[in-house]
Amino acid sequence: MKVNLAVKNIFLAMRPKQFTKNFLVFSAPLFSFNLEGEIWINAFFSFISFCLISGSIYLINDSIDYKTDRLHPIKKYRMIASGKISIHLALFVAFMIIFAVLVLSYFFNIKITSILFIYVLTQLLYSFIFKRIPIIELFFVSSGFILRTICGGFAAGINLSPWFLISVGLLAFFLIVEKRKGEMLLNKAKLIKTRNVLSSYSLSLLDKYETLLATGSFLTYALWASGPVLNGASSSWMLITVPVVLIGIFRYQLLSDSFRISISNGLTLERSTELPEQIFLKDNFLKIIILLWTVQILLIGFFTVLN
Protein backbone atom coordinates (compact mmCIF):
# COMPACT_ATOMS: atom_id res chain seq x y z
CA MET A 1 0.00 0.00 0.00
CA LYS A 2 2.81 2.43 0.91
CA VAL A 3 4.61 1.66 -2.33
CA ASN A 4 1.47 2.33 -4.37
CA LEU A 5 0.92 5.61 -2.52
CA ALA A 6 4.52 6.66 -3.11
CA VAL A 7 4.26 5.90 -6.83
CA LYS A 8 1.01 7.87 -7.03
CA ASN A 9 2.53 10.84 -5.21
CA ILE A 10 5.61 10.78 -7.45
CA PHE A 11 3.37 10.78 -10.51
CA LEU A 12 1.34 13.71 -9.19
CA ALA A 13 4.56 15.56 -8.31
CA MET A 14 5.57 15.26 -11.98
CA ARG A 15 2.57 17.51 -12.74
CA PRO A 16 0.72 15.39 -15.33
CA LYS A 17 -1.48 18.38 -16.25
CA GLN A 18 1.65 19.96 -17.70
CA PHE A 19 2.06 17.04 -20.10
CA THR A 20 -0.23 18.91 -22.51
CA LYS A 21 2.81 21.02 -23.50
CA ASN A 22 4.40 17.92 -24.98
CA PHE A 23 1.74 17.61 -27.67
CA LEU A 24 3.91 20.11 -29.53
CA VAL A 25 6.01 17.19 -30.75
CA PHE A 26 3.05 16.16 -32.92
CA SER A 27 2.89 19.56 -34.65
CA ALA A 28 5.51 18.85 -37.31
CA PRO A 29 4.14 15.38 -38.23
CA LEU A 30 0.62 16.83 -38.29
CA PHE A 31 1.50 19.77 -40.54
CA SER A 32 3.51 17.54 -42.87
CA PHE A 33 0.24 15.76 -43.69
CA ASN A 34 2.16 12.50 -43.84
CA LEU A 35 0.45 9.34 -42.61
CA GLU A 36 3.56 7.14 -42.67
CA GLY A 37 3.55 4.90 -39.58
CA GLU A 38 7.21 5.35 -38.67
CA ILE A 39 6.79 9.11 -38.37
CA TRP A 40 3.98 8.79 -35.84
CA ILE A 41 5.79 6.08 -33.89
CA ASN A 42 8.77 8.45 -33.57
CA ALA A 43 6.45 11.28 -32.55
CA PHE A 44 4.70 9.14 -29.94
CA PHE A 45 8.04 8.02 -28.52
CA SER A 46 9.13 11.68 -28.36
CA PHE A 47 5.91 12.59 -26.55
CA ILE A 48 6.36 9.90 -23.89
CA SER A 49 10.03 10.80 -23.50
CA PHE A 50 9.27 14.49 -22.98
CA CYS A 51 6.50 13.65 -20.49
CA LEU A 52 8.91 11.57 -18.40
CA ILE A 53 11.83 14.00 -18.62
CA SER A 54 9.84 17.21 -18.12
CA GLY A 55 8.12 15.58 -15.16
CA SER A 56 11.52 14.67 -13.73
CA ILE A 57 12.68 18.27 -14.14
CA TYR A 58 9.65 19.36 -12.10
CA LEU A 59 10.74 16.97 -9.34
CA ILE A 60 14.18 18.59 -9.32
CA ASN A 61 12.84 22.13 -9.51
CA ASP A 62 10.32 21.55 -6.71
CA SER A 63 13.07 20.04 -4.56
CA ILE A 64 15.03 23.27 -4.96
CA ASP A 65 12.04 25.57 -4.36
CA TYR A 66 10.25 23.68 -1.60
CA LYS A 67 10.80 26.44 0.99
CA THR A 68 9.30 29.21 -1.13
CA ASP A 69 6.55 26.89 -2.39
CA ARG A 70 5.39 26.46 1.20
CA LEU A 71 4.60 30.19 1.29
CA HIS A 72 2.42 30.02 -1.83
CA PRO A 73 -1.37 29.58 -1.41
CA ILE A 74 -1.47 26.87 -4.13
CA LYS A 75 2.07 25.55 -4.45
CA LYS A 76 2.19 24.65 -0.75
CA TYR A 77 0.01 21.65 -1.58
CA ARG A 78 2.56 20.19 -4.01
CA MET A 79 3.88 16.78 -3.03
CA ILE A 80 7.38 17.91 -2.07
CA ALA A 81 6.41 21.22 -0.42
CA SER A 82 3.74 19.46 1.64
CA GLY A 83 6.18 16.77 2.76
CA LYS A 84 4.36 13.87 1.11
CA ILE A 85 7.53 13.06 -0.83
CA SER A 86 11.04 13.42 0.53
CA ILE A 87 13.54 15.48 -1.42
CA HIS A 88 15.99 12.56 -1.55
CA LEU A 89 13.37 10.26 -3.09
CA ALA A 90 12.27 12.92 -5.60
CA LEU A 91 15.83 13.59 -6.77
CA PHE A 92 16.69 9.88 -6.97
CA VAL A 93 13.62 9.10 -9.09
CA ALA A 94 14.15 12.18 -11.29
CA PHE A 95 17.73 11.38 -12.23
CA MET A 96 16.98 7.68 -12.70
CA ILE A 97 14.15 8.48 -15.12
CA ILE A 98 16.25 11.00 -17.04
CA PHE A 99 19.13 8.53 -17.36
CA ALA A 100 16.84 5.68 -18.45
CA VAL A 101 15.01 7.78 -21.07
CA LEU A 102 18.25 9.13 -22.56
CA VAL A 103 19.77 5.66 -22.80
CA LEU A 104 16.62 4.17 -24.36
CA SER A 105 16.26 7.04 -26.84
CA TYR A 106 19.89 6.55 -27.93
CA PHE A 107 18.99 3.12 -29.30
CA PHE A 108 15.74 4.45 -30.77
CA ASN A 109 16.73 7.68 -32.54
CA ILE A 110 19.99 9.54 -31.92
CA LYS A 111 18.55 12.86 -33.15
CA ILE A 112 15.74 12.68 -30.61
CA THR A 113 18.33 11.85 -27.95
CA SER A 114 20.28 15.01 -28.79
CA ILE A 115 17.19 17.18 -28.36
CA LEU A 116 16.26 15.48 -25.09
CA PHE A 117 19.79 15.98 -23.78
CA ILE A 118 19.79 19.68 -24.71
CA TYR A 119 16.39 20.04 -23.03
CA VAL A 120 17.67 18.44 -19.81
CA LEU A 121 20.78 20.62 -19.84
CA THR A 122 18.91 23.89 -20.41
CA GLN A 123 16.27 23.10 -17.79
CA LEU A 124 18.88 22.16 -15.19
CA LEU A 125 20.76 25.38 -15.91
CA TYR A 126 17.48 27.23 -15.53
CA SER A 127 16.61 25.53 -12.24
CA PHE A 128 19.99 26.07 -10.61
CA ILE A 129 21.17 29.37 -12.13
CA PHE A 130 19.18 31.30 -14.71
CA LYS A 131 15.74 31.33 -13.05
CA ARG A 132 17.04 34.23 -10.93
CA ILE A 133 18.14 36.37 -13.89
CA PRO A 134 15.40 38.60 -15.39
CA ILE A 135 14.65 38.32 -19.12
CA ILE A 136 17.18 35.46 -19.53
CA GLU A 137 14.91 33.21 -17.48
CA LEU A 138 12.10 33.86 -19.96
CA PHE A 139 14.30 32.70 -22.85
CA PHE A 140 15.23 29.51 -21.01
CA VAL A 141 11.61 28.59 -20.32
CA SER A 142 10.48 29.32 -23.89
CA SER A 143 13.37 27.26 -25.28
CA GLY A 144 11.63 24.14 -23.98
CA PHE A 145 8.72 24.72 -26.36
CA ILE A 146 11.04 25.24 -29.33
CA LEU A 147 12.96 22.05 -28.51
CA ARG A 148 9.72 20.09 -28.41
CA THR A 149 8.82 21.42 -31.84
CA ILE A 150 12.26 20.62 -33.27
CA CYS A 151 12.00 17.11 -31.85
CA GLY A 152 8.74 16.69 -33.75
CA GLY A 153 10.56 17.78 -36.90
CA PHE A 154 13.20 15.12 -36.34
CA ALA A 155 10.45 12.57 -35.76
CA ALA A 156 8.83 13.50 -39.07
CA GLY A 157 12.17 13.75 -40.87
CA ILE A 158 11.40 17.24 -42.23
CA ASN A 159 13.02 20.64 -42.13
CA LEU A 160 10.85 22.99 -40.13
CA SER A 161 9.94 26.39 -41.47
CA PRO A 162 11.81 29.18 -39.61
CA TRP A 163 8.52 31.10 -39.48
CA PHE A 164 6.91 28.24 -37.59
CA LEU A 165 9.77 27.96 -35.09
CA ILE A 166 9.76 31.71 -34.47
CA SER A 167 5.99 31.69 -34.05
CA VAL A 168 6.15 28.86 -31.49
CA GLY A 169 8.95 30.59 -29.61
CA LEU A 170 7.14 33.95 -29.49
CA LEU A 171 3.84 32.35 -28.47
CA ALA A 172 5.63 30.46 -25.69
CA PHE A 173 7.26 33.71 -24.62
CA PHE A 174 3.81 35.35 -24.60
CA LEU A 175 2.36 32.64 -22.33
CA ILE A 176 5.32 32.90 -19.95
CA VAL A 177 4.98 36.69 -19.69
CA GLU A 178 1.28 36.22 -18.95
CA LYS A 179 2.24 33.68 -16.30
CA ARG A 180 4.63 36.16 -14.68
CA LYS A 181 1.87 38.79 -14.70
CA GLY A 182 -0.47 36.37 -12.96
CA GLU A 183 2.19 35.58 -10.37
CA MET A 184 2.86 39.26 -9.68
CA LEU A 185 -0.82 40.03 -9.25
CA LEU A 186 -1.37 37.10 -6.91
CA ASN A 187 1.76 37.92 -4.90
CA LYS A 188 0.62 41.50 -4.41
CA ALA A 189 -2.85 40.40 -3.40
CA LYS A 190 -1.56 37.81 -0.89
CA LEU A 191 1.44 39.93 0.21
CA ILE A 192 3.86 37.09 -0.52
CA LYS A 193 6.97 36.66 -2.63
CA THR A 194 7.49 33.21 -4.09
CA ARG A 195 9.70 33.99 -7.11
CA ASN A 196 12.66 36.31 -6.53
CA VAL A 197 12.96 37.36 -10.16
CA LEU A 198 9.54 39.03 -10.02
CA SER A 199 11.05 41.95 -8.13
CA SER A 200 12.89 42.86 -11.35
CA TYR A 201 9.68 43.25 -13.35
CA SER A 202 6.74 45.63 -13.24
CA LEU A 203 3.25 45.13 -14.64
CA SER A 204 3.73 48.00 -17.07
CA LEU A 205 6.93 46.43 -18.40
CA LEU A 206 5.28 43.03 -18.81
CA ASP A 207 2.37 44.72 -20.60
CA LYS A 208 4.87 46.06 -23.17
CA TYR A 209 6.40 42.61 -23.57
CA GLU A 210 2.93 41.12 -24.01
CA THR A 211 1.99 43.53 -26.80
CA LEU A 212 5.20 42.86 -28.71
CA LEU A 213 5.00 39.09 -28.29
CA ALA A 214 1.31 38.76 -29.16
CA THR A 215 1.83 40.81 -32.33
CA GLY A 216 5.00 38.97 -33.29
CA SER A 217 3.60 35.50 -32.74
CA PHE A 218 0.49 36.28 -34.79
CA LEU A 219 2.42 37.83 -37.70
CA THR A 220 4.95 35.00 -37.89
CA TYR A 221 2.13 32.44 -37.78
CA ALA A 222 0.40 34.28 -40.65
CA LEU A 223 3.66 34.27 -42.64
CA TRP A 224 4.04 30.53 -42.04
CA ALA A 225 0.40 29.90 -42.98
CA SER A 226 0.99 31.67 -46.32
CA GLY A 227 2.48 28.42 -47.55
CA PRO A 228 5.43 27.33 -49.69
CA VAL A 229 5.74 30.72 -51.40
CA LEU A 230 7.19 32.14 -48.16
CA ASN A 231 8.96 28.95 -47.04
CA GLY A 232 6.04 28.27 -44.74
CA ALA A 233 3.41 25.55 -44.41
CA SER A 234 3.06 22.83 -47.01
CA SER A 235 -0.29 24.30 -48.06
CA SER A 236 -1.38 27.92 -48.39
CA TRP A 237 -4.83 26.79 -47.29
CA MET A 238 -3.45 27.12 -43.75
CA LEU A 239 -4.33 30.81 -44.10
CA ILE A 240 -7.92 29.96 -43.19
CA THR A 241 -6.71 29.10 -39.68
CA VAL A 242 -5.28 32.60 -39.12
CA PRO A 243 -8.53 34.21 -37.86
CA VAL A 244 -9.05 31.35 -35.39
CA VAL A 245 -5.53 31.81 -34.00
CA LEU A 246 -6.17 35.55 -33.61
CA ILE A 247 -9.40 34.86 -31.72
CA GLY A 248 -7.48 32.46 -29.46
CA ILE A 249 -4.89 35.13 -28.62
CA PHE A 250 -7.63 37.68 -27.95
CA ARG A 251 -9.49 35.22 -25.70
CA TYR A 252 -6.38 34.50 -23.64
CA GLN A 253 -5.74 38.22 -23.19
CA LEU A 254 -9.36 38.72 -22.16
CA LEU A 255 -9.01 36.06 -19.46
CA SER A 256 -5.75 37.64 -18.32
CA ASP A 257 -7.39 41.05 -18.08
CA SER A 258 -10.38 39.62 -16.21
CA PHE A 259 -8.05 38.10 -13.63
CA ARG A 260 -6.24 41.43 -13.27
CA ILE A 261 -9.51 43.28 -12.68
CA SER A 262 -10.73 40.72 -10.17
CA ILE A 263 -7.47 40.95 -8.19
CA SER A 264 -7.65 44.75 -8.14
CA ASN A 265 -11.20 44.46 -6.76
CA GLY A 266 -10.12 42.09 -4.01
CA LEU A 267 -11.48 38.98 -5.70
CA THR A 268 -9.72 35.88 -7.03
CA LEU A 269 -10.77 33.97 -10.13
CA GLU A 270 -10.06 30.26 -10.34
CA ARG A 271 -8.48 30.61 -13.78
CA SER A 272 -5.29 32.60 -13.40
CA THR A 273 -2.61 33.05 -16.07
CA GLU A 274 -0.22 31.94 -13.34
CA LEU A 275 -1.49 28.45 -14.20
CA PRO A 276 -1.98 28.47 -18.00
CA GLU A 277 -2.80 24.76 -18.04
CA GLN A 278 -5.92 25.53 -15.98
CA ILE A 279 -7.06 28.05 -18.55
CA PHE A 280 -6.63 25.67 -21.49
CA LEU A 281 -8.23 22.77 -19.63
CA LYS A 282 -11.16 24.66 -18.09
CA ASP A 283 -12.12 27.52 -20.40
CA ASN A 284 -14.81 26.21 -22.76
CA PHE A 285 -14.37 29.06 -25.24
CA LEU A 286 -10.68 28.23 -25.67
CA LYS A 287 -11.55 24.54 -26.01
CA ILE A 288 -13.90 25.36 -28.88
CA ILE A 289 -11.24 27.50 -30.56
CA ILE A 290 -8.64 24.73 -30.27
CA LEU A 291 -11.15 22.16 -31.56
CA LEU A 292 -12.07 24.38 -34.52
CA TRP A 293 -8.39 24.96 -35.33
CA THR A 294 -7.73 21.21 -35.18
CA VAL A 295 -10.69 20.40 -37.43
CA GLN A 296 -9.49 22.98 -39.96
CA ILE A 297 -6.03 21.41 -40.05
CA LEU A 298 -7.42 17.89 -40.42
CA LEU A 299 -9.64 18.99 -43.32
CA ILE A 300 -6.73 20.77 -45.02
CA GLY A 301 -4.59 17.65 -44.50
CA PHE A 302 -7.36 15.40 -45.88
CA PHE A 303 -7.76 17.38 -49.11
CA THR A 304 -3.97 17.80 -49.44
CA VAL A 305 -3.48 14.02 -49.28
CA LEU A 306 -6.29 13.47 -51.79
CA ASN A 307 -4.65 15.84 -54.25
Image: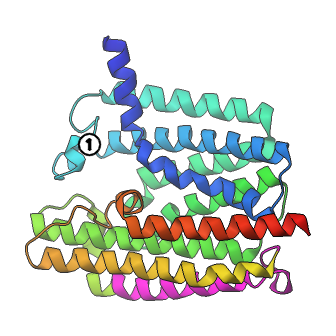
Q: Position of residue 284 (x, y in %)?
A: 39, 65
Residue 112 higher or lower than 268, as above or below: above
Q: Which residues are magenta?
A: 206-234
Residue 145 higher or lower than 198, as above or below: above
239 or 122, nearer to the observer: 239
Residue 298 higher or lower than 240, as above or below: above
Q: Is residue 213 magenta?
A: yes
Tell me how the rendering is colored: rainbow
280 or 84, nearer to the observer: 280
Q: Residue furthest right?
A: 307
Q: Position of residue 281 (x, y in %)?
A: 40, 57
Mark 1 is on which residue type? Tyr
- In the rendered image, the quadrant that contains the C terminus is bottom right
Q: Secondary structure at mark 1?
A: helix
Report the predominant secondary structure element of the magenta stretch.
Answer: helix
Q: Position of residue 103 (x, y in %)?
A: 70, 30
Q: Is residue 219 magenta?
A: yes
**Residue bearing the label numbered 1:** 66
303 or 212, nearer to the observer: 303
Q: Quadrant of residue 15?
A: top left
Q: Residue furthest top?
A: 1
Residue at image point 15% right, 74% down: 263
